[in-house]
């Protein structure tokens, strides 16, 4: 054997550097919103500081969907009381008064509803109804056929700027005269209901409105200054405003 052949046999062949696979691109953050969430937002937007704090919340979640928005943002992990709420989160935008119900799936933020503390506590009909509702939302997962039949609520994809426009909080969007007038009416009614909630006899009227749809409270619209037309606010909105006042003012 030649010396050159011997050296070649003992000299390890240079190895090609291992080709590193490119890092996986992070899943982009997206948002989906239900029609109920948009309606709820309109109802709760009359509360002081709600809109400003919600904007802080949604931008924080959009920057990092998996991070909790402080101690007021928690996920239902066990679901012992209402199993269908397991995996859903609730963030107190205004503690105990305005709570966003949402879920993050594969970096997609599903905005489901806004409610008060009475709908997220205990194990009564309100929290059970909330569980049934969120269970009906289609999260775009691979459901079994029998589970797919229950997914009757659509969450529509939307960009963050378009969401702000849809909710009427875009900085470059001026509310219409009709929106301003309706907001002013609801603020007046809510202020009235806050006063009524502190008086036992009037509080009973608010409770009757919420539970039975009793519109006896409309009597007070005529004596307000200025008076409010009795048909200016829908019955459903009246109920929501009454619920908010009752929850905010202890009985």
Image: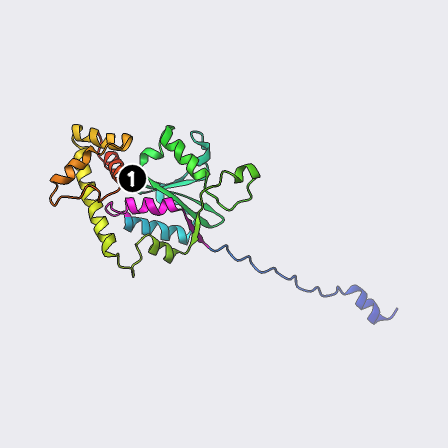
Instruction: Find disc 1 in the rendering and name its residue.
Output: 236
Image coordinates of residue 37 in percent, x first then y, are 36, 45
* Rendered image coloring scheme: rainbow
Q: Residue at x 76, y 65 (%)?
A: 11
Stretch in magenta: 29-50
Residue 194 visible somewhere in the drawing:
no
Q: Position of residue 69 (x, y in %)?
A: 37, 46
Quadrant in the picture for the C terminus: top left
- Image position of 80 with respect to 99: above or below: above
Q: Quadrant of the N terminus?
A: bottom right
Residue toward you, 41 or 48: 41
Residue 89 visible to the viewer: yes
Assess whether residue 33 is covered by the magenta stretch: yes
Pinpoint residue 80: horizontal percent, then vertical percent: 45, 29
Task: From the viewer's perspective, tell me whether residue 201 is left or right of residue 78.
Answer: left
Neighbour class for label 1 at 10 Å: few (<14), some, many (≥20)?
few
- Compare residues 26 and 160 and report the one nearer the observer: 160
Residue 154 in picture, x, y percent from top left:
45, 46
Say which element carries label 1: helix
Using the image as rendered, state which of residue 34 and residue 251 is in the foreground.
Answer: 34
Residue 190 placement: quadrant: top left
In the shown orientation, is residue 58 left or right of residue 106?
A: left
Q: Is residue 158 above or below residue 126?
A: below
Q: Residue at x 21, y 51 (%)?
A: 181
181 or 42, nearer to the observer: 181
Displayed quadrant of residue 211: top left
**73 drawn magenta:** no
What is the residue that sits farthest to the right in this orientation?
1
Taking the image as shown, residue 149 lies to the left or right of residue 224, namely right
């Amino acid at each position: 054997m030649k010396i050159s052949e011997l050296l070649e046999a003992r000299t390890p062949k240079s190895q090609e550097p291992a080709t590193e696979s490119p890092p996986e691109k992070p899943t982009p953050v997206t948002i989906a919103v239900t029609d109920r969430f948009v309606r709820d937002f309109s109802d709760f937007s009359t509360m002081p500081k709600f809109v400003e704090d919600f904007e802080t919340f949604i931008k924080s979640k959009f920057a990092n969907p998996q991070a909790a928005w402080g101690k007021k943002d928690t996920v239902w992990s066990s679901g012992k009381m209402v199993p269908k709420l397991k995996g859903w989160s609730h963030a107190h935008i205004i503690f105990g008064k305005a709570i966003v119900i949402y879920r993050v799936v594969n970096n997609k933020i599903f905005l489901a509803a806004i409610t008060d503390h009475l709908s997220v506590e205990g194990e009564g009909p309100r929290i059970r109804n909330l569980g049934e509702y969120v269970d009906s939302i289609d999260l775009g997962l691979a459901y079994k056929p029998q589970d797919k039949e229950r997914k009757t609520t659509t969450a529509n994809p939307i960009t963050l700027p378009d969401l702000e426009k849809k909710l009427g909080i875009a900085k470059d969007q001026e509310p219409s005269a009709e929106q301003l007038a309706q907001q002013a009416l609801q603020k007046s009614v809510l202020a009235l209901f806050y006063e009524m909630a502190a008086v036992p006899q009037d509080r009973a009227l608010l409770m009757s409105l919420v539970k039975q749809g009793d519109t006896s409270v409309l009597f007070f619209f005529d004596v307000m200054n200025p008076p409010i037309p009795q048909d200016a606010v829908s019955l459903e909105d009246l109920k929501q405003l009454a619920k908010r006042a009752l929850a905010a003012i202890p009985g």
